Amino acid sequence: MRRDTLVDFFRDLSNARGPFLVHDDGYRSREYSYGEVAQAAQAFAARLDDAGLRKGDKLVFWAENRPEWVAAFWGCILTGVVVVPIDYRSSIDFVRRVSAIVAARVVLVGNDVESPRPGERPVDGAAVWPMSELDWRDARPAPEVALSRDDIAQIMFTSGATAEPKGVLITHRNILANIVPIEGEILKYRRWGRPFFPLRFLNLLPLSHMFGQAMATFIPPMLPGTVVFMRGYNPAEILAQVKRRRVSVVVSVPKILDVLRDHVARTIPGASTPLVRPEPVAFRWWRYRAVHRAFGAKFWSFVVGAAPLDPALEEFWSRLGFLVIQGYGLTEAAPIVSLNHPFAARKGSVGRAIGGVEVRIAADGEILVRGENVTQGYFGADRETSAAFEDGWLHTGDIGDIDPGGQLFVRGRKKELVVTPEGLNVFPEDVERVLNQQAGVRDAAVVGRKTGSEERVHAVLLLDVSGDPEAVVRSANARLADHQRIRGASVWPGGELPRTEGTRKLKRLEIRDWVDSGRPAVTPRGTGGSLEALIARYRAGGEIRPETTIEELGLSSLERVELMVAIEEQFHATLDESRFAEARSLGDLQELVSQSTAAAAVARHDWQMPAWNRRPVVRGIRRASQALWLLPLTRLFARVRVEGLEHLGKIDGPVVFAANHQSHLDTPVILSALPGSWRRRIAVAMAKEFFQAHFHPEGHRWRQRVTSSAAYALASFFFNAFPLPQREAGARRTLRYIGDLMSEGSSLLIFPEGERTETGAIGSFRPGIGMIASRLDVWVVPVRLDGVDRVLHKSWKMARPGAVRVAFGAPLQLKGEDYAGLAARVEAEVRALGAGR
């Protein structure tokens, strides 16, 4: 089929059916269909036109992976506005530099990017639009713009490790030259895959990287498939996402496979057991069935890009019965040069060149590429453009070879080769592979170090506490060829070797400069000593030392949850909530982080959120019970006067109903006041501590245990209630549960005071309501109760008939991280709904 521009591809995407993008932000997941993404893209294109952006204007994308990224990308393509993607982990200074280079009109900003310092403008000379505020309901059509194959679609900038970042010009022609051949191959086999559709991709590559972009934006619509975005790279959560969402393919950099290998080998018995002899795939699936159960029945493949894949890593996953598909590419090739065929993958190879791409090996071993996918050059950099090309061939800077069957093998980077005095080439990756297998080595980098006029192999080691550098070098040299042997070594004092944010490639130039200079290592952001810096964000003033106690920090329960989430995300760890709650000092936290496994240990006071009460049968009985006797009985005692129901007609669920707390009758009174369409999809938060004898039976009499367990079961059954911890560990798990409820369409009823009133007066609202509303990005409906305490006071055992009032306020949208302030705003709105208003 004819593809003149990417707009032709967009039309096919618009006509696809089914779910396209799923975003799990760690608390709540949202799903968007192909039609919804296409509509949002056209509406964003109209917004760009309204803002005066025209064809050729530049718009910077600085945001984490999320559906709005994809919709906004297509909106720019439709209008001819040039997309300038930047990794969301880049510094704000780098964003400013790039924005100035391209004269950006707008910067789209995500939720997880670096915040500007107080009083500092985010980006000079450009408007800043929050990406999360993209309007999914806007149905305006995109303006008509004339486009050609040679119009610039994107400018992809390097990470900025060099003095000045280079912007690679990517045209419609370049991208189409990549995706059209792949589409042709997919169409050959698509009919055979229909029984397994939809194929679900968990995309862990940043959308600011072209391979991640292709695997999330261009390739899934060809099937069609569904793309899942998640927050962070915690291996336990990756595994949970794959199984829960029935993912078939994980798209990632090799480093993620490495982390997953360590997690699987550590947590699944038998995963590291080698094969005695080669076995068919079916036999291996059975032998390693525990691993396949952990991933789920639908998972079968890893697609790896952006960095070289260690053959031992490929061998590990292949032995377990998974297909590992790797390719080769670079930004200048938009990005794919070669790709392994899923049904004819060759181990160690990065596949054959895709259709329309020519590859050859220069006399010095450098890989050269030519084709319509190759960029026309760098933005505003004629000298760099001329240096990159020779007779129409792009110099990739990579060393490799091609076998007689046309399979391409990449050996390393040309600039990173270590040339020994004997004139022999040493590829750093080969030596690093051996070093990383030595006991006590967490990570290793190999660089060339000049000694006079000679260059020698030098190792930089990141060691465990038990690591002995001399023993490591001695053991590694015993396995290396003579010309590869390590002649010198340094121990890196930071928490992690410097790597690029998106692809996790070693920054060898930075490492070599450190070796040559003898300067102390600069600890990368998010590693090592940055635990102190991270904790300092939660404490106003005062020195942070290892002996600093958690109590000295003065954290609220919710701030503890926030701190735990931040530690998990920054250190890619899963912390056991009970052990975290028991930590008494910064030293305890440091030890917990360093010893944490990817799977949280079973907590001493472990407990599960109820799932059984969301089953169809239970929901049916609950609805019938409420209609037949629970709510009629409530109305017999409480004569309810309802106000403000018109506010509910202005919004769609799910929402959070936040009410003052007067009595055990509050929940049935509010349910009786709601229309049936809302009442049927309500989950009620109840204080977990109220059921202390159920969750912590030790120290309680059998009668208390039975009564507490029965009350908990009845509340869960008849009111879809769930426990909300107020003082102990478990709040983060509850937030995740609430997010799941809302993803299913349920609204939440919560009483932010946390306890019933004694006098009828409204108490202070706890910050939890602010955290829930902000984190889950959900409307809050204030609810005022009056008189319920005079029907059933907290000190009474029997209700007395009386009049009550339920008033619903205008919905609120809460943003930001000042959770106490947000809670105070909700409290003020509830108070303002007083009877005298």
Image (tube, rainbow, N blue to C red):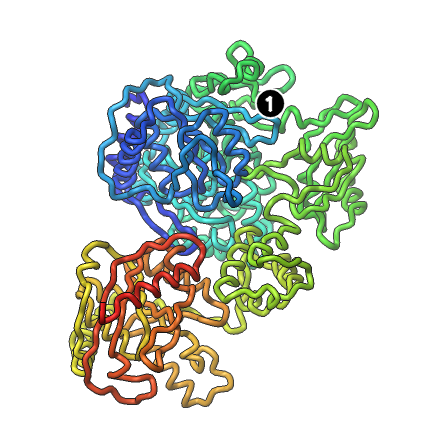
In the displayed image of the protein, which residue is found farthest to the front? Answer: 836
Residue 688 screen position, x and y as percent: 41, 74
**Number of marks in picture:** 1
| Residue 196 versus residue 587 in the image, above or below | above
Residue 347 screen position, x and y as percent: 54, 35
* Residue positioned 63% across, 20% down in the render: 365
- Quadrant location, the C terminus: bottom left
* Residue positioned 33% across, 45% down in the render: 196
- Left or right: residue 77 versus residue 286 is left
- Left or right: residue 487 versus residue 257 is right
| Residue 28 versus residue 645 in the image, above or below | above
In the displayed image of the protein, which residue is found farthest to the right? Answer: 452
Quadrant position of residue 182: top left
Answer few, some or many: residues within 10 Å of disc 1's Cα (few below 14, many 20 plus, some between 14 and 19). some
Amino acid at circle 1: Gly
Give the residue number, with chain letter if any, for mark 1: 397
Q: Of residues 225 and 44, which is closer to you in this image?
A: 44
Quadrant position of residue 147: top left
Quadrant position of residue 175: top left
In the displayed image of the protein, which residue is found farthest to the top? Answer: 391
Residue 527 screen position, x and y as percent: 62, 48
Q: Of residues 367 and 558, which is closer to you in this image?
A: 558
The secondary structure type at the circle numbered 1 is strand
* Residue positioned 43% across, 62% down in the render: 820
Q: Is residue 209 visible in the rendered structure shown here?
A: no
Residue 470 screen position, x and y as percent: 81, 45
Q: Is residue 481 visible in the rendered structure shown here?
A: yes
Q: Of residues 534 and 68, which is closer to you in this image?
A: 534
* Residue positioned 32% across, 34% down in the render: 222
- Quadrant location, the N terminus: top left
- Left or right: residue 222 versus residue 623 is right
